[in-house]
Image (cartoon, helix red, strand yellow):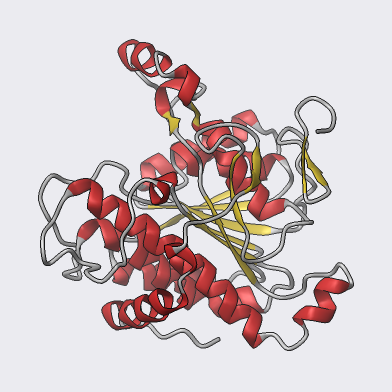
Amino acid sequence: MGAAGDVTTAGARWNPSAIPSQAGKTIVVTGANAGLGFFTSEQLARAGASVVLACRNQSRADAAARAIRARVPGAAVGTLALDVASLDSVRAASAELLNLERIDGLVLNAGIVHPPRRREFSADGLELVLATNYLGHFALTAELLPALLRTPGSRVVALGSMISRLLDSPLDDLQLAGGYQPWRAYAQSKIAMQVFGFELDRRLRAASASVASAEAAGHPARTSAFVAHPGYSIGGRTPRVAGVNEPSRLKRFVDNLQAPITQGKDRGAWSIVRAVADPAAHGGQYWGPRYIIKGQPRLQAPSATSLDRAIAERVWRESEALTGTEFTI
């Protein structure tokens, strides 16, 4: 352990209040109008990155962009319409993003935290929680791969969840046709995201003939993928930001009763930001709070299912079929 506020992991110190400069980098964050996405975007903008807030609701995206500019003078923040539950929206947003000169980071954050009580479907006929939390991001990453690959050292960060430690699934019924339960739907979608993140990095690594020498020289030029989870991060313990996070007094009171086991979403974003910005991080890593539910970001061991190659191959094929998307790595 280093100075207060620092964490030593694999020989690297990290201070969430002093993120390495991200100047010159362009980072896209989905679901950035509130919660983890907002604070991830704010922290990266504070470090000098140009951040694109890719959000379903344009007015909320605009409010988030105004809030970041007010809190971070000179912040470079833009917005883009994106509904990850709609493959048409994913393709339209991707077409715009491909016009960017570079994409240094793609944070796959948007999602449904509180699933519907009954099985619902997206506009494309896909189970809604899976479509929102995972399949839309799978398609988005595939569409944006050309921009990621032409940006040296670009990173994709898939948002996992500590629920993968509590509930497991072989992902053999992705759309829950055999029986729907809200929290099973959420757990499966986040496990699928973790499986995707690790498999994406394996495929990117295999496709890069120069990765070994590049990393040995300390210049990770290849595109890489990470998985990060925010622990138990809740709104009532999150700083108030007008137009972005405005919990009621009751919610603030109730959430603070859980203070020993929770943290604010501003701190939940730390693991995501470290996966994006730590120059010592390497693809295929799993980042989360030190104490699993809260704390400074550190490397963690993912579940066995998240790393299962057979599951990954099957889920990848099914994801391509469901989304009509093919990765060209």
Q: Is residue 83 visible?
A: no
For the point 53% across and 74% down, the residue is 200
Left or right placement of residue 54 versus residue 177 in this view: right
Name which quarter of the figure residue 105 lies in.
bottom right
Is residue 203 positioned above or below 226 on the image?
Answer: below
**Nearer to the camera, 295 or 86:** 295
For the point 49% across and 67% down, the residue is 307
Name which quarter of the figure residue 139 lies in.
bottom left
x, y (%) of residue 326? 41, 86
Quadrant placement of the C terminus? bottom right
For the point 50% across and 33% down, the residue is 265
Q: Is residue 63 visible?
A: yes
Point out the residue furthest to the right here: 217
Quadrant placement of the N terminus? top right
Is residue 167 positioned above or below 150 on the image?
Answer: above
Left or right placement of residue 257 versus residue 182 in this view: right
Left or right placement of residue 201 versus residue 83 in this view: right
Across the whole image, how many numbered discs are drawn on residues? 0
Is residue 85 positioned above or below 56 on the image?
Answer: below
